[in-house]
Image (cartoon, helix red, strand yellow):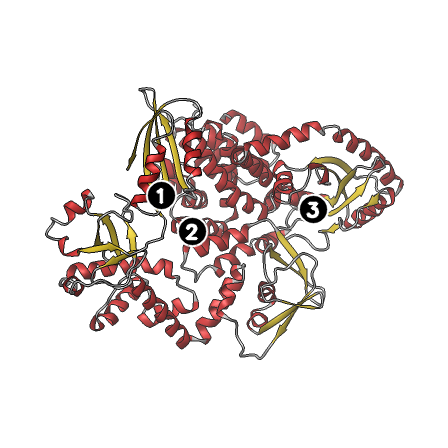
Amino acid sequence: MTYEKLEELLKEAGRSYDMELIGHAYEVASAAHRGVKRRSGEPYITHPLSVAALLIDLGLDSASIAAALLHDVVEDTEVTKADVKNAFGEEVANLVDGVTKLGQITFSTMEEQQAENLRKMLLAMSQDIRVMLIKLCDRLHNMRTMAAMPDQKRRDKALETMEVYAPIAHRLGMNNIQEELEDRSLAFLDPVGYQDIVSLLERHGGRGEFIADVARQIRQRLEENGIEKAQLSSRVKSIYGIYRKMYIQNKEFEGIYDVYALRIIVETVAECYNALGVIHDMYHPLPNRFKDYISTPKPNGYQSLHTTVLGHEGIPFEVQIRTWDMHHTAEYGVAAHWKYKAGIQGPDKLEERLAWVRQLLESQRDSEDAVDLLRNIKSELLPEEVFVFTPKGDVINLPTGATVIDFAYAIHTAVGNRMTGAKVNGRIVPIDHKVATGEVIEVLTGAKDKGPSRDWLSIVTTSEAKSKIRNWFKKERREENVAEGKNMLDKELRRNLITLPEDKYDSFMEDIAHRQRMNSAEEMFAALGYGGLQMSRLLPKVKDEYAKLVRSADPVEIFEMPIKKQKSSEGVIVEGIDNCLIKFAKCCNPLPGDEIVGFITRGYGVSIHKKDCPNALVGRNLDESSPRWVNAYWADGVRESFKSTLEIIAVDRPSLIADVSAMIANMKVPIYAFTARQNADGRSSILVTIGINNIDHLGSVIAKLKKVRDVVSVTRT
């Protein structure tokens, strides 16, 4: 892609563009990226040029094209947002800044960072949808050119695309981009499954000729019935769409009836239904395979009639019938607002189509827990959804997996709060019943002051329902929330050996609350009680503050307690401490039979080391830490399984790994990790982590492994 080719695309688009603005944006981007190459070896500027070309196809305006050319300069070069604003104006600067703020959503990083990146992405999207359209085109071009990236990078990007960007494209109704993102992601995530489906499609290529012949017959019959301007075309189901049905729904390829489909585009809605009548008159419709998305559009605005019929040759095929307006919306989604005036009528319709983004942000506003936030947002983005009915016939759409409680809150907050049970198709169902498409659901309600149950938070799946349940407890049960939250936190303090003197408890909790941007400890307890603040988010900060308190205080009394044996925990007895939290040091991996010693950590329990562990030998001689080392013993009759890693050195030969694995399996010893590498001296080094009961058991395992042919040595690491 070059700027000259981009200019040709702009002229061919037939729209009025500000060529001076776009040309200046190219000059700035080209200068900023000069000398920089992509991993493929191409000049970096080819990427923003390609993104801009994709936006031209979507029909976006001059500001969007300029922003696409500049979308990486603030993030990757010395150009600032202020520079962009001075040169191109506030509109372009905000678009560039919006894309820059999205950052990299990498699912191998900390969950809290993932959640913040997702929140930023949705916020930018809610303020200006063009930001997301630029980001989607950016990701699409990156996926098209991912072959030059390392394998792990490709898989990470593909997973991110599959979990976030493809679902967003679906929610925006951008079918073409969604399907290409899914197919390209699948090629990296499951290349074998992807290639299997490609091969199946090539083997069944004759179906295309069958559909073409059917199209000629249908066109003739439509003209005979007065539908003269219909356009007919064939459509092959996306590879990922087939993959889902074959590998997730466990269907055979021959049992997927919509692999090949005939699409009929007509002028009016009335002609859609007339064409449907013609099709059903010509071919036998299969039962339960008709869907009317015209009278009941999908949440992303998709409208069409779908029916599956049996051809005269006994081959089933799908027929999709829609108007041109519906077709534009199906192909381009919200981008039809720019590409076709008839796509989305007026700004009000566009706002309505983006209402789900704002609703999602609103429902997540009080959520503090990164894990919960990620799970909720990703579940809301899932393309799968079910359509259920109220007794009056109103349609309610919910994500797959939603329960009758989610349904109640989708109707109205008051209905959910007063819910006592539900009937599905006239029969009483459990409160955790998962709804399915076509069900008629009646919510049974009680007194006005009934209120939801705390247990519902673990049952509902939609963020909207969770937010409404939390809000009810937040407003209606403050005292109960405070007591519940305080009890939860105190329990965690005891479990983590955090002991606060009575005279410091209140001040410590007040300080923690202020660090959570809350006015008082009572407010923090209440937030814990109703679920607005998650313990997993709060506890690490409590531990950090407690560690600071311990460092600044006198030696803890526990170090001066008389030595006596207490109850065991995790098979270990620690002198002076009863039922404490135990963890085994990874530096020496102690086993029953080893002489051990304990180190009291600040807020994290007691860490158990072997007595001859280098870390223990050094630590016990340090003045500042020696008081925190305590005697420890193995409890009698310890039966727990402990992990131990062995290094096996052997002469390299075929079947060596198989022989070692077979020996371990014969001893009925669990294997947790197994790695092997070939050394330069013709030997192999094998590291295997196994489950061991005690030091004697380990000795027996080592002795038997040494009997394997060509094994030179077996040592415990």
Please determine whether, in this image, residue 459 is positioned above or below residue 634. below
Q: Nearer the viewer, residue 492 or 701?
A: 701
On-image quarter of the C terminus: top left
Nearest to N terminus: mark 2 or mark 1? 1
* SS for dot 3: helix
Residue 509 in the image, given as x and y percentages of width and height: 28, 68
Disc 3 crowd rating (10 Å Cα; few below 14, some 14-19, many 20+) is many
Q: Nearer the viewer, mark 3 or mark 2?
A: 2
Residue at image mark 1: 82
Q: Compute the Cα span from label 1 to label 3.
A: 41 Å
Viewer-side label of 1, 3: 3
Q: Residue at the location (80% across, 43% down)?
A: 309
Q: Secondary structure at mark 2?
A: helix
Q: Amino acid at mark 2?
A: Ala
Evaluate whether residue 150 shows in this view: no
Q: CA distance from mark 3 to mark 2?
A: 35 Å
* Disc 1 to disc 3: CB gap under 8 Å: no
Instruction: Please name the residue shown 59% across and 56% down the image.
Output: 401
The answer for how far apart the CA atoms under marks 2 and 1 are is: 28 Å
Type of amino acid at the residue the image marks with label 3 = Met
Residue 75 versus residue 362: which sits nearer the camera?
362
Q: Amino acid at mark 1?
A: Ala
| Marker disc for residue 326 | 3
Residue 115 — which label?
2
Q: Is residue 481 visible?
A: yes
Residue that protrudes farthest toward the top in the picture: 681
Cβ atoms under marks 3 and 2 closer than 8 Å = no
